[in-house]
Image (cartoon, rainbow, N blue to C red):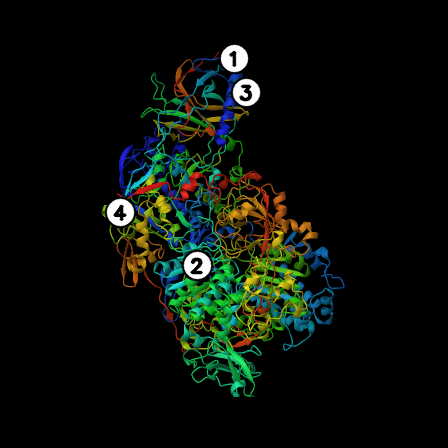
Amino acid sequence: MGVLRKRSLWVVALLAAGSAACRRGPVRSTEVVAVVVDRIPMDPAARAWEQAPEHLARLLLQDLVEPRLLEPSTPEVRVRAVASQTEIAFRLEWPDSGRDDLPGPGRFVDACAVQLPRKLEPEPPDPQMGASGRPVEITYWRADWQASSDGRRDDIREYYPHAAVDHYPFQAPPLRPGSPEQREMARLYAPAEAAGNRRSGPREVPVEDLVAEGPGTLAPAEKTVSRGRGLYSGRQWRVVLVRPLPAGLTPRMRTQVAFAVWQGSHGETGSRKMRTGWIPLLLKGAQ
Amino acid sequence: MARVYNWQIGREMSYWYPENRPQKQFAAVFDINKCIACQTCTLACKTTWTSGKGQEYMLWNNVETKPYGFYPLAWDLKLLEMLNGQRWNGGVYEGETIFECAPAGERVLGWKPESQDYAYPNVGEDDCSGEVHKGASCALPHTYWFFYLARICNHCTYPACLAACPRGSIYKRPEDGIVLLDQGRCRGYQECVKGCPYKKVFFNPMTGTSEKCIACFPKIEQGLQPQCFVNCIGKIRLAGWISPPGKARADNPIDYLVHIRKVALPLFPQFGLEPNVYYIPPVHVPVPFLEQLFGPGVSEAIRVYRSAPKDPDLSGLLCLFGSTEAIVARWRRQGEFVSGMDERGAEVVRVPLREPVEVRPAFDSRHQIVRINCP
Amino acid sequence: MSRDISRRDFFAMLSASGLAGFLSSIREAWGLEAISNPLAQYPSRGWERVYRDLWKYDSKFVFLCAPNDTHNCLLNAYVRHGVITRIGPTMRYGEATDLYGNRVSHRWDPRVCQKGLALTRRFYGDRRVNQCMVRAGFKRWYEDGFPRDKDGVPPRKYFNRGRDEWVRVSHDEAARIVAAALVNIATTYSGEEGKRKLRAQHYDEATIEATQGAGTQTLKFRGGMPLLGLTRVFGLYRMANSMALLDAKIRNVGPDRALGGRGFDNYSWHTDLPPGHPMVTGQQTVEFDLSAVEHARMVVVWGMNWITTKMPDSHWLTEARLKGTRVVVIACEYSATASKADDVIVVRPGTTSALALGLVHVILRDKLYDAAYVKQWTDLPILVRMDTLKYLRAQDVLGSAPAALQQTRLLRDGEREPPPAAHREAIVPEKMRLEWGDFVWWDRTTNSPKLLTRDMVGKNSTVGDPLLEGAVEVTLAGGKRVRCRPVFDLIKEYAAHFDPKSVEEMTWAPAQAVESLAREIARQPGTTLFAVGMGPNQFFNNDNKDRDIFLLAALTGNVGKIGGNVGSYAGNYRVALFNGAPQYINENPFDIELDPAKPARPRQYWRPESAHYYNHEDHPLRVGNRLLTGKTHMPAPTKALWFANANSILGNVKWHYNTVINVLPRIEMIAVQEWWWTASCEWADVVFGVDSWAELKHPDLTASVTNPFLQVFPRTPLKRIFNTIGDIEVLALVGDKLAELTGDQRFRDYWKFVRDGRTDVYLQRILDFSTNTRGYRISELEAKAREGVPALMLSRTTPKVVGYEQVMDSRPWYTKSGRLEFYREEDEFIEAGENLPVHREPVDSTFYEPNVIIAPPHEALRPAGPEVYGVRRDDLRCETRCGRNVVLTWEQARRSAHPRLKEGFRFIFHTPKYRHGAHTTPIDTDMVAVLFGPFGDLYRHDSRSPFVTEGYVDINPADARELGIEDGDYVWIDPDPEDRPFRGWERNRRDMEFARLLCRARYYPGTPRGVTRMWFNMYAATPGSVEGQKTRADGLAKNPRTNYQAMFRSGSHQSATRGWLKPTWMTDSLVRKNLFGQSIGRGFLPDVHCPTGAPREAIVKITKAEPGGLGGQGLWLPASLGLRPRYESAAMRKYLAGKFVTRKES
């Protein structure tokens, strides 16, 4: 019922945000246009973003593969893009009545992602995570990673402030905090971390680079080179995602881009998401 | 969806993947009549596998008091409510399994527990089924009753967690049938948590992945029983290998109790997972409640169990439980003794049906001293 | 790339090779193809190594876990990087053997429990006592030279216990402070001046006289349950013995007149002693190893929650049942053990003696008794004089001198008793034997009186066709004629009052159940075991209970047989299992043996004392004009208290809040040896941080009353985790300091072998001088223990069965008559109206007039009523109630009422033990606590909760509804305001804030209305825990200064208990076996004939405090979800009825 309450609030907020958007009456482009700038603004609120036209991307239910999302949530995401010589950056904005950045049992987090095909080709692969032999590249941001990179401690009391735990074997004397033995022991008791799963543990960056060749094939890139930053305003998320320019994309060239948004309080995770199809992405020439 | 055969419901059913039985299937028998709810199993598992951050609330092994105990809250009640027409026709289940009534967009019928559902892990402890009044007394079956239900992952033949995972990060080991969740591949969607009707997969918020009972496979690989079995002081548990009904052998203790004597029964067979932990139902509890949990074989199982005083094979085997750390793959009774053997037939343990009485000399002349019970 | 390289390695390689961000070749590592059928195959399983790594350990070692639960488990500790990461059973009990080649089977494995597995969290947890602490004020008192006022009282400013700051000091300094305090206190209270000060402090004159002018007598020592550590725990009594050296110095007296310290009792202090056992048998306790149940046709589990308190031995019960043993459970609730029973009878608390009498009634009425057993083994045929109410003596009738005895050795005046190990038959002082004389039974065939000596038992019994019913006129030697009746006849007349219908009203046990159970027991004599638990024993009438259960057992031939016996189960107490212990505890401090090869020459200078007087506001029982505590029991004032292994003496003491608020201020030093910060530490002056079981550097010994194992605490290889030393090293260290302070080197020599690291010398002396261990070498036993293998105790039989020698070898019991005595002829019993095995109503836990004797007018019942003591008959105050001998018929009693009933005190509140703790070990440990009861929540969604679980009261839903209490609400529980939670609470709000019991209420369907239950020994609230809950951000009831963690917001299960004293526990005349060996004495004997208290006696009032929902809003979650009794949703009701499945036979 907690979820229900949150969601109805969210609808109200959505309307408010929508009307606000109308009042502002921004320049709307039919494609995503990345304006070339000298320095990529990491601050989602930076005025620099206003240089780029806003694209209003309509979000669709992911209702093609199980498990599906059958109830719509976030209807649209407002996108602006800028680029430098080496990187391309997107700012995604969507309304959200509450910040969901504490994962837990039955508790999911707000997130978004930008997807590009690996190869520049006239006919891009299936927007649903690409296709065999035709990988897509995804840059994925999560609200809990944002909190972690903003300094949330790796401590159960960050999740449950009144929790009381007597003992962790990896924190007992004679182990010295931070010593190699101590760190090895700590790793043993965090199985995902021990298995090299980089979803776990404290993070420096709130994003992860991923590749996929179709549903069920999503895999982390061997290392994350993208950056990102999300800011919650109390009624909406603004998230900046910065990734390398796709190989071969030069000014005045086009490729495709797709977006996805996960509404944590709506139980959205994995393939239960709101997403777009491919949208043309133009890398604008320098003025 | 594929069609697979589930012997526990006596029919074919649909499942996300085609039928594929492992070379060997890990299985266990729990004698509820011996369970004392001491929670030693719970702590044995806890201290071995889930002492890390984000795992505090996690009990891969738990013991709850039925009928008022649940971990997580209402775990079985919720699904029983969602499941249509649970009808048994003799040994054939005519209702729907959780695979057969999966809603649109879902792979299985399930529900998502929330953090507070895991609070109060021993709620209902020792609460009996009715209010005891002045002048209460009972004989079998008891008017007021409760019993202890020790639970681990059932390492099902048709796991719902495995079917529910969109990434295929959960798999069944061909060599022993143990169901594992790949900690490297999992992305923490919690579809398995939602899908497992026994609620034996848990989400770890600190690692961002889901985790589950591993049947202590590092021990199984060494021929040893899992921690919750070896630490069971009620001596209610026996771990081993189960054969498909057609291939049952009397010298395999699990086969003997499940297939031959039919004294041990699966938990919620109607869910359709073909779980591999088998329970000897408590003899003091009325049959209807038990059939809801263990299926149509309850009355027969209770009859067989109560015949044990006149059945040295059955009582002997049940007294062998918990007497060795080794997996007992074979067993035999010789007179007053019962032996357990490993797969090569080598004896790993031998115990008497009754512990003998030893009498010492009243005066030990070698040590020049009396030996006395009232010193 | 090969499949079994883990992804971790793979990524390591990649990042090393520094490829670009997005890479396609990952397919190799874990296949970008979706997995086709995970039932069949899985691409990469290298990750499984993660759990194999977690399973690994660097080394393992064995330690012994021995809380006071009677089990004692050798456990494996698994070590990684120097840390014990987990614990497990050794699985080698099945290899235990003895000197004769006997062996037990692996059915004894595993031996372990959840509490033992949780110990890692205690070895390393934040309440571990990791050094020595001294209370700041106490340190100042020491540094200022122990200043005192004229009356001897130290200035209050030094004694802000429970709220004071703590100072960390070295063990050396702590020992110096304690030694100095002992010397100062002993000196202060020695001689006439000492007596003057004690009088000025208003101590009871009798207790002042008891010191005999020796200040050392005011020093109280306690090694809690010393069987659990023969040298390191029992050592406190050795320390008490050495106080004789101090007395010799202070009073300048010789070894002949010097007095040691006083040692508190244990088994009786814990209310574990069944005080009626010695009243019937002369033996401390009759019992059997629990595995004996395999050999019984039927077992009556009576007020014993076997499966929760005897966990490792529960399988003997369930397996016996599996093989056909009939299990009958009698309890005051549908208990855990009831769920393992064939038959269950739910009774009213505190009515066990009435129920036993009801069963006896049926057996006598229908003549179902075992006549042969009655004639051979009981006093039932013996004649009692109706003029004096004493046994008729043979001398008075036959005029003959007392007969010569074959089976009893007489000790002439001044003759020294040989050491226990040399006892072959009973040893009785000649003077006593002459007083006893011999006895008489009436021969119906010759119609004449016949001689009966204590030899004439079993096959030596000459009792042929005795008069059992009716009276006879017997002509005494002097010609006088006296009316006499056999004990049988007196009891039958009394038991007639307990017909099944009345017993049903008294006990709530259905008349039909009483009839059928009696028949079932009598059906086959000698094949029923009575396993009696702590429940019935914790009531004031516990000695009546024992006498009546024994009566039932004796009438059915069920005493002393492997498959037919009585057992009382509570505590691991029988130090007599090592009856060579005096070699160590009583070594003569004036004549110390320093040659490791030679035995010591024991001489006892310390005097035992019941801690119940300290618990009774440090005075004996006086009612009206009568002192009802016997001389042999008389306590001395308590001015210093030093204990080890014993939270029960303070932190978990009965009437806790009265003790800490009203008694502690009169005690001048409290020293505690602990490895876990308990409530005892909260109230102490000095806390010595000592080694845990995992760190012992000195071996030690123990054994058990419920299993056959002789066990060693092996020395462990684990490096000490914190700054601690061994308990026994603390004793040696204080010995050193005493030597320095007094200049008497004997204080130092007394502990020589500890300093030399040769504690084994003391242990070997004990083994050599104990009847059931001689022949064992401590070195060999320890070597085996290191491997996880115990040895077998060399008792007469395995399983041990007390009474075996009596029945099998026809040896007399340790009574005057050599028989099981159901009549008590001593003056104290006649005065109390308990010369017969009567039923008394509970002293507080009853709806009727408390403590009345239920009886018909009876020729042999002539108690001294209140008037005799100068007390009004309607004076029902708690104290006078104890010595109130009022007889009512059941007809009168059932119309009477408890004096507080009309004020709303209408719930019996009892506090049994449970599966989640052995006493207080390790209940406040997170993973154990969270499973203790229904309110566990590690994440504490409700921050009002004092810990990850909390104390709660079980209340019948109908009662709760009537009081407007919802399931899960917080409630106040108030006992009799006369003197609880502590005397003077009305004028003391500051202390009442932590003393008044506030807890959760659980709708509990298992007990009938009017009966409430709170599980024993969750951690009590202290001033510090209340402060913590008010000041800490997390709201934990945890002392900010000490980390003490309470499990109540305020109060505890001891808020309602009280120090009750019963006259029949305190006689000077009861004949009973001495602790060690076969000699017989009389009067006070610690842990044998001494007060037990009655901690289940409390009638309370319950009122709602706060709603149970999160943050005090609405219903507690499980209730709001419809999952709780009385709150069932439609679905839950369907579930309970098993209606979710339908079934038809095909």
Task: Identify which amino acid the numbered label 1 is placed on.
Answer: Gly
- In the image, which is nearer the foreground, mark 2 or mark 3? 2
- Secondary structure, mark 3, is loop
User: Gap in Å between the C-alphas at discs 2 and 3?
Assistant: 77 Å
- Name the residue that disc number 4 marks: B243
Q: On the picture, is B327 further left or further right than A89?
A: left
Task: Identify which amino acid the numbered label 2 is placed on.
Answer: Val
Q: Is any atom of residue C601 visible in this view? A: no
- Name the residue that disc number 1 marks: A25
- Secondary structure, mark 2, is strand
Residues at marks 4 and 1, common chain? no
- Name the residue that disc number 2 marks: C329
- In the image, which is nearer the foreground, mark 4 or mark 1? 4
Residue name at image x 37 percent, y 29 percent: A67
Task: Identify which amino acid the numbered label 3 is placed on.
Answer: Ala
- Secondary structure, mark 4, is loop
Chain of the residue where label 1 is placed in the rendered structure? A
User: Gap in Å between the C-alphas at discs 4 and 3?
Assistant: 67 Å
Q: Quadrant of the C terminus of chain C?
A: top left
Chain of the residue where label 2 is placed in the rendered structure? C
Say which of B110 and C454 sits in front.
C454
User: Gap in Å between the C-alphas at discs 1 and 3?
Assistant: 19 Å
Q: Quadrant of residue A136?
A: top left
Q: Quadrant of residue A66?
A: top left
- In the image, which is nearer the foreground, mark 1 or mark 2? 2
- In the image, which is nearer the foreground, mark 1 or mark 3? 1
Q: Earlier in the sequence, mark 1 or mark 3?
A: 1
Estimate how packed mark 3 is, as few (under 14), some (14 to 19) or many (20 or more) residues with alpha carbons within 10 Å.
few
Estimate how packed mark 1 is, as few (under 14), some (14 to 19) or many (20 or more) residues with alpha carbons within 10 Å.
few
* Dot label at residue A46: 3
Task: Identify which amino acid the numbered label 4 is placed on.
Answer: Ser
Q: Position of residue C344 (x, y in %)?
A: 43, 57
